[in-house]
Image (cartoon, grey):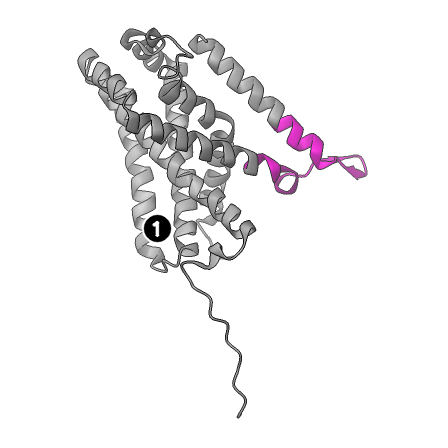
Amino acid sequence: MARSHKPVIWSLFAAGGTFSAFVTPVMILITGLAIGFGLLPAEALAYERVLAFVQHPIGKAFIFLAVFLPAWHAAHRLRITAHDFGIRADTVVMGICYSLAALATVMTVFVLLSI
Amino acid sequence: MSRKPYSRTVSTTGWWLDQPRYIRYMAREVSCVLIGAYTGVIVIGLMRLSDGPAAWAGFLEALQSPLSIYFHLLALAFALYHTTTWFNVTPKAMPVQVGETQLPGIFIIGAHYAGWVVVSAVALYLVGV
């Protein structure tokens, strides 16, 4: 049977979709909306507090998953959706989408290792 | 062959505007743009955090701008749509067999929603709502 990279990409898509389904809404609420709408005090995202979270091994692991999985999920779905919008240059689209996801992943790993 | 074959004229770019269910399909697919962009916001935030307190304060201030609030409202709407569409296909994506019978889909979907409520509540509790 011919080897294919599809199972890897599809597992990442599924894992990322599941992670995003469970976690992304509450993350958007916490980081983007809660303080503006008065649900959280501004201190909730204070520098020392967020830094301590990102420096903790569990925090690092969470942040890694919270970037890596949704990024690859979104990249793969965007590639497929480009086709639905009539863009047939799959090689170019694939290059752009997966490069963006790779860039986000690499930058995250870099910050997590150095912070 | 003298007959003229029938060929439908279907737009490759706007076909999905034809029917509500195609529009719902595309809304589900386009959720990835918002989820991807939000992931980018997280990466930027991480980099600002590693640049020190002043950079982080600037990032927090930018998060409170009207543009940022509108973006996050839109992102939340699409993220919630992603969540519901993702959970609603779980009985097809991973059917559960109990003995000889299939577990009804409503239980599989319900378990996902219950887990989602717990995850969201725990996250909000840990952050300090």
Give me the residue at 66% from left, 38% from top: B91
The residue where tag 1 is placed is A94
Location of residue A106 in the rendering, given as x and y in whole percent from the top left corner:
29, 32
Q: Does residue B114 show up magenta in the picture?
A: no
Chain letter, disc 1 residue = A
Location of residue B46 in the rendering, given as x and y in whole percent from the top left corner:
28, 22
Give me the residue at 36% from left, 22% from top: A32
Q: Amino acid at mark 1?
A: Met
Location of residue B107 in the rendering, given as x and y in whole percent from the top left corner:
70, 30
Is the residue A12 above or below the residue A47 in the image?
below
Is the residue A11 above or below the residue A85 in the image?
above
Of all residues shown, which one is farthest toward the right?
Answer: B100
Give me the residue at 53% from left, 79% from top: B6
Q: Does residue B104 show up magenta in the picture?
A: yes
- Let me know if residue A82 appears in the view: yes
Q: Classify mark 1: residues with Cα within 10 Å, few (<14), some (14-19) or many (20+).
A: some
Q: Secondary structure at mark 1?
A: helix
- Let me know if residue A108 appears in the view: no
State the extent of the magenta-drawn residues as a range: B86-112
